[in-house]
Image (tube, grey):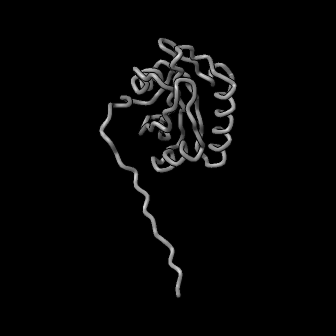
Amino acid sequence: MVETCCAYRLMLVREDGFPLSNGPISSLADLYAVLQPIFAGMDREAFAVLCLDVRNQPIAWNMVSIGSVSASIVHPREVFKFAILANSSSIILCHNHPSGDPSPSKDDLDLTRRLVKAGDLMGIDVLDHLVLGHLEFVSLKEKGLM
């Protein structure tokens, strides 16, 4: 008897959404303007990845995880699976703190380091990680934390 192996086909399915940007992201204000609507009104912690092309123009975003009021489970495989399918040159990570305080936790910093290392291995740059509060945000890159 001959064993068979299943063949699979991967596809990226485009869903309707809101416009990401009218051009490249060149400032933190531009970045916040793109990401804030994704998290508006969320009462639980959520983690998203924004995919960029070689000119830093957004091409797609994906909600990787929605968790509880204090945590969201994120694994590199889910972050980079989408980034690879979207043909991303680089990515920007973002998650919210429903408490309203955007101060990054130790877990946030550990996860960011892990994702930067994974991106280095795959040739996909992790440009920044934003933590969103209610009316403010923290850029880990700007704070020198990545």
Residue appearing at x 57%, y 38% in the figure: 74
Q: Position of residue 22 (x, y in %)?
A: 36, 29
The outermost residue toward the bottom is 1
Q: Position of residue 144 (x, y in %)?
A: 68, 22
Q: Nearer the viewer, residue 56 or 146?
A: 146
Q: Position of residue 29 (x, y in %)?
A: 47, 18
**Above or below, comparing residue 136 to residue 66 in the picture:** above
Q: Position of residue 121 (x, y in %)?
A: 66, 48
Residue appearing at x 63%, y 21% in the figure: 104
Relative placement, left or right, of 80 versus 37 is right
Task: State the image quarter where residue 30 is shown.
Answer: top left
- Which quarter of the rendered picture does the C terminus lie within? top right
Q: Nearer the viewer, residue 120 or 15?
A: 15
Q: Nearer the viewer, residue 104 or 139?
A: 104
The outermost residue toward the front is 68
Residue appearing at x 32%, y 42% in the figure: 15
